[in-house]
Image (cartoon, grey):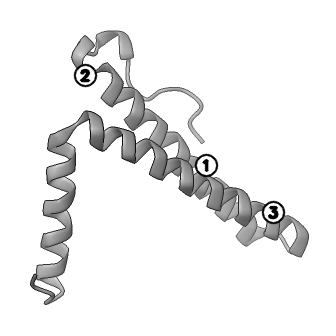
């Protein structure tokens, strides 16, 4: 698990700083989700498994919060996210 921001924020242009902070937050939350879900899969305790899965679910909400903010900050990200969805739909034969 990574406990530090994976980029040097002091080297980021001021106008890009908030976007990079939000991306770092998303990375941290995804890292936490992976950790909690892996631990839930390893434990034989139903109580621990239940709590770990609940915490992982909360982290998924945090990803959504960071992503919502990122999409407000970065219109290119918003556009490309939509493009990615379209490409997946096309590859799966679901044209809109």
Query: Residue at point 59% right, 55% down?
Result: 33
Give the position of the C terminus as an image quadrant. Answer: bottom left
One can see residue 32 in this view: yes
Residue under numbered circle 1: 32
Mark 2 Cα shell of 10 Å, populated few (<14), some (14-19), many (≥20) = few
Q: Which numbered disc, 2 or 1, marks the residue closer to the eye?
A: 2
Real-space Cα separation, disc 3 to disc 1, in angstroms: 14 Å
Residue under numbered circle 3: 51
Residue 43 appears in which quarter of the rendering?
bottom right
Mark 3 Cα shell of 10 Å, populated few (<14), some (14-19), many (≥20) = few
Q: Secondary structure at mark 2?
A: helix
Mark 1 Cα shell of 10 Å, populated few (<14), some (14-19), many (≥20) = some
Give the position of the N terminus as an image quadrant. Answer: top right
Q: Residue furthest bottom?
A: 93
Give above or below for 36 relative to 71: below
Q: Which numbered disc, 3 or 1, marks the residue closer to the eye?
A: 3
Q: Which mark is residue 16?
A: 2
Left or right side of 75 for 48: right
Give above or below for 63 relative to 57: above
Query: Residue at point 87% right, 75% down?
Result: 46
Query: Residue at point 28% right, 39% down?
Result: 72
Q: Secondary structure at mark 3?
A: helix
Real-space Cα separation, disc 2 to disc 3, in angstroms: 37 Å
């Amino acid at each position: 698990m990574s406990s530090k921001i994976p980029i040097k924020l002091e080297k980021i242009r001021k106008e890009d700083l908030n976007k990079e902070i939000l991306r770092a937050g998303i990375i941290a939350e995804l890292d936490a989700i992976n950790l909690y879900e892996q631990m839930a899969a390893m434990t034989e305790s139903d109580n621990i498994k239940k709590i770990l899965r609940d915490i992982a679910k909360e982290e998924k909400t945090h990803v959504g919060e960071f992503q919502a903010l990122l999409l407000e900050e970065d219109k290119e990200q918003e556009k490309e996210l939509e493009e990615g969805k379209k490409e997946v739909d096309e590859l799966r034969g679901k044209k809109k």
